[in-house]
Image: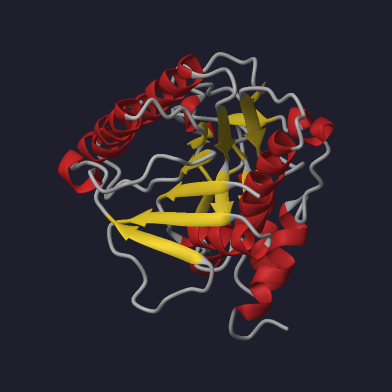
Amino acid sequence: MAKLLIVGCGSIGLQLAEELSAKGHQVTGLKRTPPILAITGINFMAADIASLAQLNALPTDFDAVYFIVSPDGRNPDSYQAVYEQGLNNLLNIFKQTDANPQWILVSSTSVYGQTQGEWVDEASTAEPQNVPSRYIRQAELQLTALNPKNIVVRFSGIYGPGREYLIRMAQQGGAVQKEPVYYTNRIHQADCVGVLVYLLEQSLAGIALEQYYVASDNDPAPQWEVISWLAERLGAEQPTVKAPDNTAQSNKRCNNQRLKALGYQFKYPSYQTGYSQLIKGVKGVN
């Protein structure tokens, strides 16, 4: 069993910690404000990674480190604080003891700047247009250069309990782009956890892994199709057609074949399978 550090224990990090602990791994969660109530099998440490002084007590004898951070806001300063300053602080702490654990960085498909509905995979150009995503891309490059065993997982739009943006959009109605086609790419948060566990297990088993994995479901679909389907299931009004717009900052289709070829099987391979279960919890839907 491995000794693991999870940097950032939000909803995904916490679920990951619980699953890895249940599998017998020794798990430490690093979080600015740890849960008030103890969680069996998980040791929490309170620290803000943007503050080097708060990391002085952090042990470094970990086999692997998950980096799953959430910036305070969608502004450049918030992304710089965690993906640059925070990451560098952690790397400095590990460097002081010559520790070199494997890193698994949770990234985003926002690092792709494609805007014309192109298919993208791990070999596609990743040159984001916005500053926040550039900080994520910078962290990717930093960690992959540090150790060939380090892994970057690029999640597409995460949905699940508490992440119901498209459901609210369908309920509220309004105009949705139909032409030119604007694609949405999604992954259920249960699959986020599943992918992160699976990659660690493959690594511990000695399986040779790539440094980059796109983690998105099997069905990049037009936003018009997804919202129309949700509206029908929710008993809401169908969307109206938005005036044509070619100004999207990001419009692509994510190819997950590398992850599937490794052997990962999605729990929710399409938006229909994932949202069918999620909307059962919405009032008025059977």
Where residue 34 sits in the image (x, y, percent)? 34, 66
Where residue 130 sits in the image (x, y, percent)? 35, 26
Horizontal side of 71 relative to 207 (left or right) equals left
Residue 79 sits in quarter: top left
The C terminus: image quadrant = bottom right
In this view, the residue in front, 62 or 285, is: 62
Q: Is residue 174 visible?
A: no
Where residue 210 sits in the image (x, y, percent)? 68, 22
Residue at 54 percent of width and 33 percent of height: 109
In this view, the residue in front, 105 or 219, is: 105
Residue at 53 percent of width and 68 percent of height: 41
Residue at 75 percent of width and 30 percent of height: 206
In this view, the residue in front, 221 or 27, is: 27
Residue 84 sits in quarter: top left
Where residue 29 sits in the image (x, y, percent)? 42, 56
129 in relation to 37, above or below: above
39 in relation to 210, above or below: below
247 in relation to 29, above or below: above
Horizontal side of 157 relative to 89 (left or right) equals right
Residue at 46 percent of width and 18 percent of height: 146
Numbered marks: total? 0
